[in-house]
Image: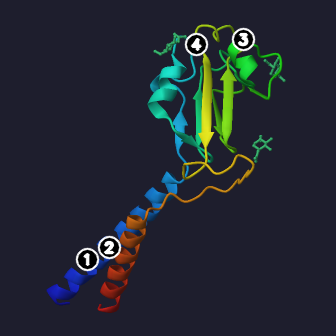
């Protein structure tokens, strides 16, 4: 095998790896996963208003992951009044099993979560607004469930370029 063939083979494999990496990274970018509270998790004495300001905007298709010590917290989805009053008596959803809970933002609009175990007034409540992808949002009447791809035009060019270079390198082997 001549060095130039080896070189071309190496280049082809490198391009192929880049292609795979590109596809995987963009697949992941389509829906973001947010750990509520970051390292502090879903716990008393964390200011989730500050956390939301740091991580917004949130989009349809994103996931909120709540991590909490087993048996010490719950995640109660409530309406705005329930959020303001720390009132869990009228839950939209209610989760308290295990040590984590993954929640998908499957529609646009407001989401409110509180902990019903006494720490809500101390700050253990979360208010999130979920936006269409990509913003700015179309009329709220369209409840489109599908996640629009976040591919930019420059990404598409890069993808086509990588594919073409890989293909031509493989053909020349
Ligand atoms: C959540 O559900 C559990 C089990 O169904 C129930 O015992 C608990 O009272 C509920 N909590 C709230 C705040 O609705
Ligand atoms: C979002 O998920 C909830 C809970 O699974 C479900 O009741 C609701 O119908 C879903 N909404 C949409 C727009 O898919
Ligand atoms: C959280 O931080 C915000 C902004 O700094 C502040 O307005 C709010 O009072 C804080 N909430 C709690 C429960 O400390």
Mark 3 neighbour density, 10 Å: few (under 14) some (14–19) many (20 or more):
few
The image's mark for residue 15 is: 2
- Where is residue 65 shown, x and y percent of the image? 59, 34
- Does dot 3 land on a helix, a strand or a loop? helix
Name the side, left or right, on which 36 lies relative to 169.
Answer: right
Please tell me whether mark 2 or mark 3 is closer to you in this view: 3
Rendered view: 82 above or below 146? above
Query: Is the C-beta separation of discs 1 and 2 under 8 Å?
Result: yes
**Ligand 1 lies in quarter:** top right
Please tell me whether mark 1 or mark 3 is closer to you in this view: 3
The residues bearing labels 1 and 3 have C-alpha atoms spaced at a distance of 62 Å
Identify the residue at image location x=35%, y=74%. 162
Please tell me whether mark 1 or mark 4 is closer to you in this view: 4
Residue at numbered disc 4? 123
Residue at numbered disc 3? 85
- Earlier in the chain: of badge 1 and badge 3, it is 1
The image's mark for residue 11 is: 1
The residues bearing labels 1 and 2 have C-alpha atoms spaced at a distance of 6 Å
- Does dot 1 land on a helix, a strand or a loop? helix
Determine which quarter of the picture holds residue 58.
top right
Identify the residue at image location x=53%, y=21%. 49
Rendered view: 155 above or below 7? above
The image's mark for residue 47 is: none
- Does dot 2 land on a helix, a strand or a loop? helix
The residues bearing labels 4 and 3 have C-alpha atoms spaced at a distance of 12 Å
- Earlier in the chain: of badge 4 and badge 2, it is 2
Please tell me whether mark 4 or mark 2 is closer to you in this view: 4
For label 4, being within 8 Å of ligand 3 is answered yes
- Does dot 4 land on a helix, a strand or a loop? loop
Which residue is at the front of the view, 5 or 40?
A: 40
């Amino acid at each position: 095998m001549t060095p130039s063939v080896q070189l071309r083979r190496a280049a082809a494999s490198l391009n192929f790896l880049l292609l795979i990496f590109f596809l995987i990274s963009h697949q992941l970018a389509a829906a973001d996963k947010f750990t509520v509270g970051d390292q502090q998790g879903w716990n008393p004495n964390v200011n989730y208003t500050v956390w939301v300001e740091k991580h917004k905007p949130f989009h349809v298709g994103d996931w909120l992951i709540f991590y909490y010590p087993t048996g010490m917290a719950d995640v109660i989805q409530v309406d705005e009044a329930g959020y303001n009053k720390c009132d869990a008596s009228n839950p939209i959803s209610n989760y308290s099993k295990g040590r984590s809970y993954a929640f998908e933002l499957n529609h646009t609009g407001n989401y409110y979560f509180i902990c019903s175990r006494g720490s809500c007034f101390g700050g253990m409540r979360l208010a999130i607004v979920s936006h269409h992808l990509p913003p700015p949002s179309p009329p709220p009447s369209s409840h489109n469930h599908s996640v629009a791809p976040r591919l930019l035009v420059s990404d598409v060019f890069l993808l086509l370029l990588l594919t073409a270079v890989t293909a031509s390198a493989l053909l020349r082997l």
